């Protein structure tokens, strides 16, 4: 098991120009991280091969592995031409992932921002063939590079464990798995313990984050809260500080035999550097505490 950090955890620093992605790599090395997942917000690398080379070289120089690359995608397009344009756009990202030596690329299959009627099982069934075809085309393109493409439980439609499995089974490619986010099941009000247990055997990499959770009938007031599909209140927390049963999730992951990357994602209201550092430490501490029991 290797603990690292998603660049998204420090997106505020990146977007405000306080850090570059190269600074993030150094910060991870200095704060106990073993690897970095790239989420290109606050910087862009797909059309910048020079930066891609700098990232690869900087990571190697400080001993931080480049574990994965995650980006938005949407195969639900109005025409076949637009669909194929989206596939070609994503292929360019596969190329840059290969250039950096990364072996995991997560892509979405539908837009993140959806209307309530687009979060339903009916919308999922209507567009499943597009999800599958787009994912197959990307997985097939990535295969010669030794890259595994993944779908995450993410984005308010393909977010439940069953829907993720449905896509994986239909795509039917050995190099198409899931990026398992232990927290995102709450966005569609699925118990994270259930979601993790059901999908851990399909996981190529794992996101560790935490949420505070309040029921739909108890408005928590001001703060960076958002709503689940069914109206419950959620807010990002430092891993180990929120309402997820992190200890039991760790037990489930260990019992599955998973021994790959764990990427911390921090989405809380606290200072992102402080939150990320505490989260990395908590994941490692809780993982080690479980071994001592």
Image (spheres, rainbow, N blue to C red):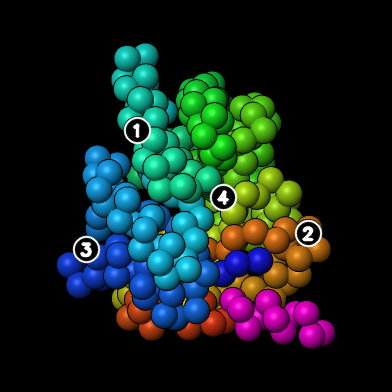
Q: Secondary structure at mark 4?
A: strand
How far apart in space, not on screen, are marks 2 and 3 (Cα)? 37 Å
Mark 4 against mark 1, which lies toward the viewer?
1
Q: Which mark is residue 15?
A: 3
Q: Main secondary structure of the magenta part?
A: helix
Q: Is residue 272 magenta?
A: no
Range covered by the magenta-colored residues: 283-293
The residue carrying pointer 3 sits among few (fewer than 14), some (14 to 19) or many (20 or more) residues within 10 Å by Cα, namely few
* Rendered view: 24 above or below 52: below
Mark 4 against mark 2, which lies toward the viewer?
2
Mark 1 against mark 3, which lies toward the viewer?
1
Residue that protrudes farthest toward the left in the picture = 17
Q: Earlier in the sequence, mark 4 or mark 3?
A: 3
Mark 2 against mark 1, which lies toward the viewer?
1
How far apart in space, not on screen, are marks 4 and 3 (Cα)? 25 Å
Which image quarter holds the N terminus? bottom right
Mark 2 against mark 3, which lies toward the viewer?
2
Judging by the rendered image, the residue that carries numbered circle 1 is: 92
């Amino acid at each position: 098991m290797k603990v690292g950090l998603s660049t998204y955890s420090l997106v505020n620093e990146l977007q405000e120009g306080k850090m570059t992605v190269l600074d993030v790599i150094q910060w991870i090395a200095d704060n106990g991280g073993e690897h970095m997942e790239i989420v290109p917000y606050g910087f862009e690398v797909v059309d910048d091969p020079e930066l891609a080379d700098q990232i690869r070289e900087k990571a190697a120089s400080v001993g931080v592995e480049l574990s994965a690359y995650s980006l938005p995608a949407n195969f639900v397009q109005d025409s076949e031409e637009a669909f194929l344009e989206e596939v070609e756009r994503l292929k360019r990202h596969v190329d840059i992932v290969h250039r950096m030596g990364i072996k995991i690329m997560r892509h979405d299959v539908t837009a993140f921002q959806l209307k309530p009627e687009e979060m339903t099982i009916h919308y999922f069934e209507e567009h499943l063939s597009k999800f599958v075809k787009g994912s197959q085309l990307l997985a097939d393109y990535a295969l010669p590079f030794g890259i595994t493409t993944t779908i995450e439980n993410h984005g308010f439609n393909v977010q439940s464990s069953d829907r993720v499995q449905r896509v994986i089974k239909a795509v039917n490619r050995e190099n198409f798995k899931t990026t398992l986010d232990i927290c995102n099941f709450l966005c569609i009000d699925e118990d994270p313990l259930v979601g993790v247990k059901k999908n851990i055997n399909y996981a190529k990499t794992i996101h560790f984050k935490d949420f505070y959770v309040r029921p739909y009938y108890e408005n928590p007031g001001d703060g960076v809260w958002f709503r689940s599909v069914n109206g419950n209140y959620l807010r990002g927390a430092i891993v180990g500080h929120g309402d997820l049963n992190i200890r039991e999730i760790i037990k489930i992951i260990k019992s599955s035999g998973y021994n790959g990357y764990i990427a911390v994602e921090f989405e809380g209201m606290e200072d992102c550097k402080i939150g990320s550092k505490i989260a990395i430490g908590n994941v490692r501490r809780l993982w080690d505490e479980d071994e001592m029991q």
